Image (tube, helix red, strand yellow):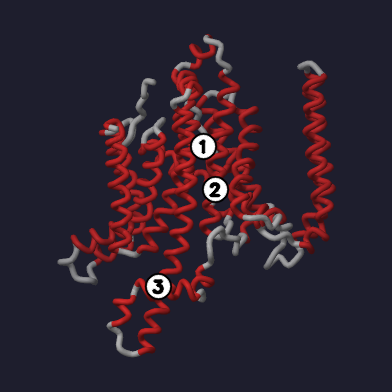
Amino acid sequence: MKQYLNVVTAYIIMFTLIIFVGVFQSWSQALSILNYCLISAVMTIGANIQWGYAGLINFGIMGYTALGGLAVVLVSVAPVPEAWKAGGINMVGSLGIVVAMIFLIRYVLKRIQKSKQRNYLIAGIIVIGILLIRLVAGPGIESIEAVEPAKTGFLGGLGMPILFSWIVGAFFAGGLAYIIGKIALGLRADYLAIATLLIAEIVVSIIKHEDWLARGVKNVIGLKRPVPYEIDLQTAPWFINLVEKLNSGKLKVIDTISERQDVLNQLVIDASSVYVKLCMAGLFLSVVIILLIVTQKALYSPWGRKMRAIRDNEDAASAMGKNVVKEHLLIFILGSAVVGLAGAMMVTNDGLFTPGSYRPMRYTFVIWVMVIVGGTGNNFGAILGGFVVWFLWVEAAPIALFLINLFTSHLPETNALKIHLIESAPYFRFLMIGTGVLLIMRYRPQGILPEKIIKQ
């Protein structure tokens, strides 16, 4: 138990800070931070599986996150019959061409020995396939995007439960990771990082510009929820009675019935938001706990020890008969699948899918900072890093504004310096996160909770 004392202490401090937000700001804000901390924790678990377990640098995290979000749209949104009628056959035909291309290429790779002839044949299959796809899909895409573009303009989804889309999001990301891994995992570490980052940009660009798939930058709103809607709670008698009972002391001191009713209505509105976020937090926390248990078991299993051996010395592990390429591919798929799951959770929490918000050049490195700050190779550390960095990302502006007002309280409200500092408060998050990372790298170079090898 002593070895986990630092872990317990760090998490107590973190949850205490979130409680302070609830006390001094609002419980709705505190639960919003908690939910995004939990989603960030899932992302950092995925990144830590790849980097902490196997030493693989994957800068394509936002691509897998976007695929997870896309899965929510394709699974949970109701289908658009008019769009399917206008161009559905064309898109199904294009999918058939893609499948045929894959099987033809696999057939050529198996039947023909490595040669220039085989390369030319594969290139020919790809070129002809792309031309056929353009001929078949082009008219279909135009017809689909012309169907009420302000409201739909896309095929829609399958109309299935949204929780099922979380699993599909993980499979989407894992499938893409398998393709990328087959191509790019042979690259040196720095080239692998560049390749994965560029592939993420390609994935996000496709999702943003293919309106027939998920409306592109026009966004998909009003997605299903696995928890009740606030408006339904605000009209539910059981919920109104519960809020009234919990706030009976506050309501008794109000004299007039009309004022009491107005206060109760406001309390119900506030409580409905808290209740929904609390339900979402329960779902997200369940996912984090399950992943933590599984990853901890894996880390200290023979398989985990093998992965760390490969990470520390690939040549020695290969000399001992370990298939390094195969193990790297497996860990790459697993980590990417977890990130895809996080992407689906994030879209579910937001209730909308906004492809324009996925910026690989920016947010990928925020996730990496979370892993490095928390502690590479330590699952508890990776999760803590997600909490710490996201908390600072959200609360940096309020904290900066409080400190600015405190230290400039002696200055008049019209003072130019005071006005400039107050207007610049939102940008202090970059200063605080940068300073925090520098301090941690100076005094805790292995992270807040560094990796510990437990001998068993």
Question: Is residue 256 rendered to the left or right of residue 212?
Answer: left
Categorize mark 2 by other alpha carbons within 10 Å: few (<14), some (14-19), many (20+): many
Categorize mark 3 by other alpha carbons within 10 Å: few (<14), some (14-19), many (20+): some
Given the image, on which type of amino acid does mark 2 rest? Gly
Question: Is residue 24 rendered to the left or right of residue 152?
Answer: left
- Dot 1 falls on a residue whose secondary structure is loop
Residue 395 location (% of width, % of height): 34, 56
Residue that carries the numbered disc 3 in the rendered image: 243
Up-down relation of residue 67 to residue 444 (above or below): below
Please tell me the numbered disc located at residue 59.
Answer: 1
Residue 140 location (% of width, % of height): 81, 55
First reached walking from the N terminus: tag 1 or tag 3 = 1
Given the image, on which type of amino acid does mark 3 rest? Val
Up-down relation of residue 256 to residue 104 (above or below): below
Residue 452 location (% of width, % of height): 35, 27
Q: CA distance from mark 3 to mark 2?
A: 33 Å
Q: Quadrant of the N terminus?
A: top left
Categorize mark 1 by other alpha carbons within 10 Å: few (<14), some (14-19), many (20+): many
In the foreground, 244 or 182: 244
Q: CA distance from mark 1 to mark 3?
A: 46 Å
